Every structure is written in C-alpha cells, then in structure tokens.
C-alpha cells in the first residue's frame, strides 16, 4: 500500500478544549507556587486528591508529568541521571524520568506555556501506596530536596473483596491527615467543602466512564490511544467543575460519532483489550500499527483506573477509602480476571494484549500465568508484548510489529474458522 492509500489516524475528539484546559491547569499551578498565599500539594495519581482540594491546595500529579516526559521521548537522556543517584534502572521509569528531568532542570510543561519554568514547588507531598511503594520513595526524594512534609496513606495489596475492615482503616488514615493539612494550609477543615469536592469527583468519574463506554459501539468511536489523551482532566482535575464541563462536551462529540456510525478505525474488524501500562513514547506508532491492521484497541484497564464509582458525598472519608481501595491494581488475580471477563463481554473483545512493562511489575499482570489461563481455560486469544511505559530502550519496534501482526492473523483465522 503506498502512503497515500494508507488509513490516517482520526482526530481525537475534543482534543483542542482539552489542551486549553490542561494549559490553564499548568499555569495555575505555576502561579500558585509563586504566590506567597498560594498552596501547592503534590499527589499520587490515585491518592486522595479530594482532601487536598478541600483545603484549597492546587494539586499537582508527578505521574502525569512522568507520562508527559515519556510521550516527549525524553526518558533515555534523563533516566541515567536518577540512576547515578542510586535509583535502579529496574524501578519505575516515571520516577527515574521525573527525578532525572528535575536534575536536568527541564519540564515539558514549558512547551505548553512559556510562563512555566519548572515543576511547582510543593508545600506538602501526599502519597497513597495503593498502586505501589515506588511513589512513596519518589515523593520522599522531593520531600528531602524541598524540606517539606511527606504524608500518606498506607494501603492494602492483593485483596479480594473490599470489606469494612479495609475501609475503616484507610478512612481512619485519611481523617488522621486533617490536623497536619490544617497546619500546612493554614485553613480550618470544612466537611461541607470536602463533600462538595467528592460530589464533583463522583460526577467526573461517571462522565469519564460514559466516555470510555462509548467504545462498546460497533464500530467504536474512540481508541485506547484517544483514551490516554482524554483521560488528562480525570486524573489531574477530578473534583474541579471544569473537568466535568469538559467531559460533557467531549461526550456529546463522541456520541455524535456513534450516531453517525463513524468508527475511529475505518473498516474495524478486530477489537482488542489492552491490559497494562501504555507505552508513552510509542502512542502514535502503536495507534498506527493497529489502524493499519483494521483493529481497534477499544478498552483498557489503564484508562478505567480513573473510574471511582464509590465516591459518595454523604460519606466522604469512607467513600474515598472505598474508591481508592477498590482499584484494580489493589486486587488479587481472581478479582482481576472477573473484572477483565466483564470488560471482554461488554466491549465485545476478540483478544487481550498484555503489556509487560519492565519497570512496573504492579501494572504487568502477565507474570503469573494470567494470559495462559485466558488462552487455555477461556479460549480468548492473548498476546504478551515486552516493553515499558517510559524507557524506550526496553521497547523493540520490530518485535511489537511482528507480534501484533501475527496476533491479528490468529484473530482472523479464529473468526474465519
Ligand atoms: S504503578 Fe507502576 S508506573 Fe505507577 S508509579 Fe508505581 S511503578 Fe510507577
């Protein structure tokens, strides 16, 4: 096929308003860091951001910054700087990329708006170990550097059902942070403000779920790669009414595509579920690879991770505890398989791709036989691709292409048979 006849990647819906919203958010962070009365908190991506917002902090998410660095393909130059401090090349490449960028004095946020010179200086750093221990070590490095408090929630791992015992313990830890946050922010805790923020986050989560669920349509109006872009506000602005307004607008545009029968992939034939981290430095390449094979990666665990159905303003602490503990990453394999089963059915998936991200074992669910169980016991074709979220030295483009093409041939034979 010559280049002119090759299918082109369709524009991500609502990309422009999203870019403007994200720019405003980054500028507000920079301004708050410069303002003597401003307060900035750093938070892990699935940490209790609602609590921080209720105290009036501007909330910055280093993982979002890590993903921006990955997308900008800056990781290979930056990671060695963190390695030189003793942070292993085998640990989270968000951590090593982000600390490497800090040491190099660069940030991709400067490209978004020239007023931004650096990451915003924090007044406090808040982690939740629900996803991994790396985040605590990551934040502790900055806590030492800036000499500011590092506070956090220590979560469970590998749990099946989330019970009252889990919720009480995590809610208690979150409530226990209040006096310290009052001291740092200089603001008295207001439970009504927290209820309001939790309500906004709940609405954001519902809208984000609605956006992702549109991909159940045939053909699907969006791809996983669109989702990795559109998820920005759900990650960094949940609890802020602007995120909700954005998703209302995006949803209208995406639903119009569904009504017009307009798919993100022309001639969509195969539908795939992506389990694991995105490969940030290869988003466009991978989007093109699936496009050229008439396949749509319609859904993913990753994008779904910012759906927090448990938020309830009537019980702000308990519902935050439940929402941030019910996450896929916190659960055992039996739960994870039940969850993926539901996704396979809801999105009419033909096969599952497992991304084994070298530096994130926490989000690599292929390592204890899950793909084999799907293929052998459930008859669902699976593919494992080796790579990484940020460190592109761990990605083989040739292998990815060969493996994906062979996988799609397998799906075609299965459909034909
Ligand atoms: S879950 Fe993985 S990618 Fe996320 S911070 Fe932890 S190690 Fe890094």
Image: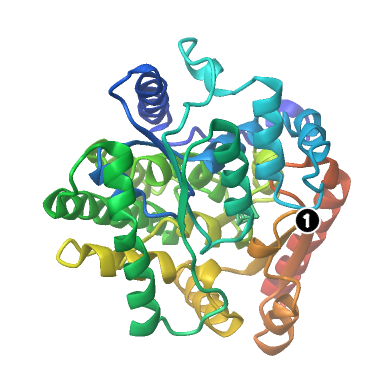
Ligand 1, what quadrant?
Answer: bottom right
Q: Where does the image place residue 219, in percent across and percent down from the top left?
A: 48, 54
Q: Nearer the viewer, residue 247 or 406?
A: 247
The coloring applied to the image is rainbow
Asked whether mark 1 lies closer than 8 Å to ligand 1, one says no
Figure quadrant of the N terminus = top right
Closer to the camera, 324 or 413? 324
* Image position of 249 with respect to 115: above or below: below
Q: Could you tell me residue 104's position as x and y percent? A: 71, 22
- Residue at image position (42%, 45%) is 235
Q: Is 110 displayed left or right of 310 in the figure? A: right
What quarter of the picture does the C terminus occupy? bottom right
Q: Which residue is mark 1?
A: 358
Front one among 226 and 379? 226
Q: For residue 79, which quarter of the picture? A: top right
Q: Residue furthest bottom?
A: 377
Q: Is residue 166 visible?
A: yes
Q: Look at the picture and state if 304 lies above or below 113.
A: below
x and y, in percent, of residue 103 in the image: 70, 26
Which residue of the protein is positioned furthest toward the top in this rendering? 114
Instruction: Please tell me whether mark 1 sits on a helix, a strand or a loop.
Output: loop
Nearer to the camera, 303 or 358: 358
Q: Residue at x 22, y 62 (%)?
A: 316
Q: Is residue 188 left or right of residue 139?
A: left
Local crowd size for mark 1, using a 10 Å CA cut-off: few (<14), some (14–19), many (≥20): many
> In the image, is 209 to the left or to the right of 295?
left
Which picture quadrant has residue 269? bottom right
Give residue 400's position: percent from left, percent from top: 81, 51
Q: Is residue 285 visible?
A: no
* The quarter of the displayed image where residue 47 is located: bottom left
Is 415 drawn above or below residue 165 in the view shown?
above
Look at 76% across and 30% down and name the residue there: 78
């Amino acid at each position: 096929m010559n280049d002119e006849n090759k299918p082109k990647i369709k524009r991500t819906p609502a990309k422009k308003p999203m870019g403007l919203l994200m720019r405003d958010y980054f500028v507000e962070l920079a301004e708050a860091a410069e303002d003597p009365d401003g307060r900035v908190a750093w938070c892990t991506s699935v940490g209790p951001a609602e609590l921080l917002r209720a105290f009036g902090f501007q909330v910055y998410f280093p993982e979002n910054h890590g993903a921006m660095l990955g997308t900008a393909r800056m990781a290979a130059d930056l990671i060695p700087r963190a390695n030189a401090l003793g942070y292993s090349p085998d640990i989270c490449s968000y951590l090593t990329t982000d600390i490497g960028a800090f040491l190099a004095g660069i940030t991709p946020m400067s490209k978004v708006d020239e007023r931004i010179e650096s990451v915003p200086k924090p007044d406090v750093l808040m982690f939740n170990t629900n996803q991994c221990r790396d985040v605590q070590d990551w934040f502790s490095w900055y806590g030492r550097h800036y000499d500011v408090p590092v506070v956090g929630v220590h979560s469970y791992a590998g749990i099946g059902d989330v019970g009252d015992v889990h919720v009480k313990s995590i809610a208690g830890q979150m409530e226990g942070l209040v006096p310290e946050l009052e001291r740092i922010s200089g603001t008295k805790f207001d439970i009504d403000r927290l209820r309001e923020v939790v309500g906004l986050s709940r609405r954001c989560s519902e809208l984000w779920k609605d956006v992702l669920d549109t991909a159940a349509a045939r053909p699907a109006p969006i791809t996983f790669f669109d989702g990795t872009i559109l998820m920005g506000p759900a990650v960094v602005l949940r609890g802020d009414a602007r995120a909700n307004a954005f998703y209302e607008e995006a949803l209208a545009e995406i639903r119009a595509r569904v009504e017009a029968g307009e798919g993100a992939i022309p001639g969509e034939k195969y539908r795939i579920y992506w389990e694991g981290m995105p490969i940030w430095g290869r988003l466009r390449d991978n989007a093109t690879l699936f496009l050229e094979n008439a396949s749509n990666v319609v859904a993913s665990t990753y994008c779904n991770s910012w759906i927090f159905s448990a938020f309830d303003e009537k019980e702000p602490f308990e519902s935050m505890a439940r929402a941030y503990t019910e996450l896929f990453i916190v659960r055992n394999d039996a739960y994870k398989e039940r969850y993926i089963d539901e996704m396979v059915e809801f999105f009419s998936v033909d096969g599952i791709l497992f991304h084994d991200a070298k530096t994130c074992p926490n989000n690599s669910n292929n390592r204890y036989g899950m793909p084999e169980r799907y293929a052998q016991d459930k008859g669902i074709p699976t593919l494992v691709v080796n790579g990484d979220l940020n460190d592109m030295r761990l990605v083989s483009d040739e292998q990815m292409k060969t493996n994906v093409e062979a996988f799609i041939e397998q799906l075609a034979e299965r459909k034909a048979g």
